[in-house]
Every structure is written in C-alpha cells, then in structure tokens.
Amino acid sequence: MATLEIKDLHVTVEGENGPREILRGVNLTVKEGETHAIMGPNGSGKSTLAYSIAGHPKYTITSGTVTLDGEDVLAMTVDERARAGMFLAMQYPVEIPGVTVSNFLRTAATAIRGEAPKLRTWVKEVNGAMEAIQMDKAMAERNVNEGFSGGEKKRHEILQMELLKPKIAILDETDSGLDVDALKTVSEGVNRVRESGEVGTLLITHYTRILRYIKPDFVHVFSDGRIVESGGPELADKLESEGYESYAKAGA
Ligand code: ADP
Ligand code: MG
Ligand code: MG
C-alpha cells in the first residue's frame, strides 16, 4: 500500500539576503485511497511544499525526510520520482515548445510503465480520457500548454493524472482560475482516479470551493510554513466561515 511520509521538512529558497526558510517543519502522511486537503493563505508555502516533493532545484531541503513506501524520495531524480508513482500538477503549468500533448503523454506513459503503450489501445485510451475531461481532440496535436487557457491547462494536468495513474498525486491549486463548469469537469476527473482507490491525493488549495466537489478525508491548515491544525472535512467548513485570520502567525 502506497504511503507518502513527510517528516519535519525544512526548506529554504535563495533570497536577496541569503537563504530564507519557507517550510519550517512539515509533518504529513498520505496513504493510498486517502485525500488530504492542504489549505492556507497565499504565501504560506503550499507551492513550496509541492515543488520540494517534486524535486524542483530552486528549493533546498535543509532537514527532514520524504519517503514513498520507505524509499527516500529526496534522493531520487525527478524522473525516478515519476517512475515511483509520484505525480505533481503544478499551480502554473509550464509551456513545452515543440512537444505536442500527444507525444508528451506517450513519452511520460512509456517512462512510467517501463514500455511503450501499444499504439492502438493507447489512442483509444487518450481519446477516451480527453473526452471524459472535455478536451477537444484537436488539442492532442498542440504544443503542451502553449496558448492554453487557464482551464485548458488544468484539464491537461488532470488528463495526465488519469492516464499515468500515479500512486500519489499532488494537485496544487487545480481549482484556481476555473469557472464552475470547468471546476466540475476537472473535479470529476480527479474523482474518477480516486475511485480506483489506489491513489493518495494531496489537494492544495486556497479556497474551500473545490472541496464541494472533491471530498477530502482530512483537512490541514497551513500557515507560515507548517501545518498548524488538522481535522476532518468539518475543518473546511470552519475555514469557509471564519477564514484564516485566527491562524495568523503568532510568533513570526
Ligand atoms: P503559497 O503557494 O502558499 O502561496 P509559496 O510556496 O508560493 O506560497 O510561497 C511561499 C513564500 O516563499 C513566498 O514568500 C514566496 O515569495 C517565497 N518563494 C516561493 N518560491 C520562491 C522562489 N523560487 N524564489 C524566491 N522566493 C520564493
Ligand atoms: Mg501563492
Ligand atoms: Mg501556491
């Protein structure tokens, strides 16, 4: 059973006056089949957590551990992380000039599955998944994220998630910039993958809105680089009515 374990994670980024600590001791365990929502104000370090787990070179881990089924994730290359079953949908998906969606997905699937998917079944798989996430088939031949609208970028992220079937999915602000219809479609995609019961999901968000469509098992409040409160779905209701004010940094 897949388990992502984050223990006492401290992370710095390079600032004008030297390294600045952004994550200040994050502890979290996400198991297969579970959905955890991380909610917090802008600038609290949520994306830094996602990038650090993904292995982005800008973020320096100064102490703590991240393991997937006991394996040291932080010692893995970015590719190895993906092959181990980690998936990150970024808040700001990047353009990949010269690489079509179709080629990108096939390359990723080949790397993760260890062999190239059979062309005929693969085309069916991709078409089915694109239809489900309501992406125009013509988009398969466009370069990844080039000229995509906000909604198209998020759909493409979830399309990847559906096709790559990760063990652990980290979704950073997948709801940002979506209108209600797009939010529903994207949420349904996430829920289809969740229903397989084989993915552990870390849903990072600023707003409670997406939690109406994707029901978390656990909610964590993130403030100033760490989790300051954890609870069940009722914690999201409390945040919806009270906001983050009561968590404003006490000792900063
Ligand atoms: P959130 O996702 O919760 O809005 P972020 O993780 O994006 O928060 O940012 C947390 C803090 O870390 C902010 O003060 C931000 O400016 C800083 N930060 C994040 N990434 C970088 C970076 N690559 N370089 C410099 N500062 C960064
Ligand atoms: Mg932010
Ligand atoms: Mg962010």
Image (cartoon, rainbow, N blue to C red):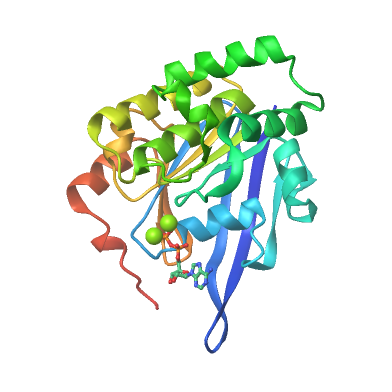
| Residue furthest bottom in the image | 17
Nearest the viewer among 251 and 84 is: 84
Q: Residue at x 33, y 59 (%)?
A: 41
Residue 213, image x, y percentages: 32, 27
Question: Whole-percent x and y of residue 196?
Answer: 56, 17
- The percent position of residue 219, horizontal first and vertical second, equals 40, 42
Look at the image and tell me whether residue 106 can be seen.
Answer: yes
Where residue 178 sits in the image (x, y, percent)? Answer: 30, 39
Q: Residue at x 41, y 33 (%)?
A: 216
Question: Residue 172 versus residue 251: which sits nearer the camera?
Answer: 172
- Residue 155, above or below 44: above
The one nearer the camera, 199 or 189, is 189
Q: Is residue 112 left or right of residue 164?
A: right
Looking at the image, residue 157 sits to the left or right of residue 239; the answer is right
Which image quadrant shows ligand 3?
A: bottom left
Q: Is residue 100 left or right of residue 77?
A: left
183 in relation to 219, above or below: above
Number of marks in picture: 0
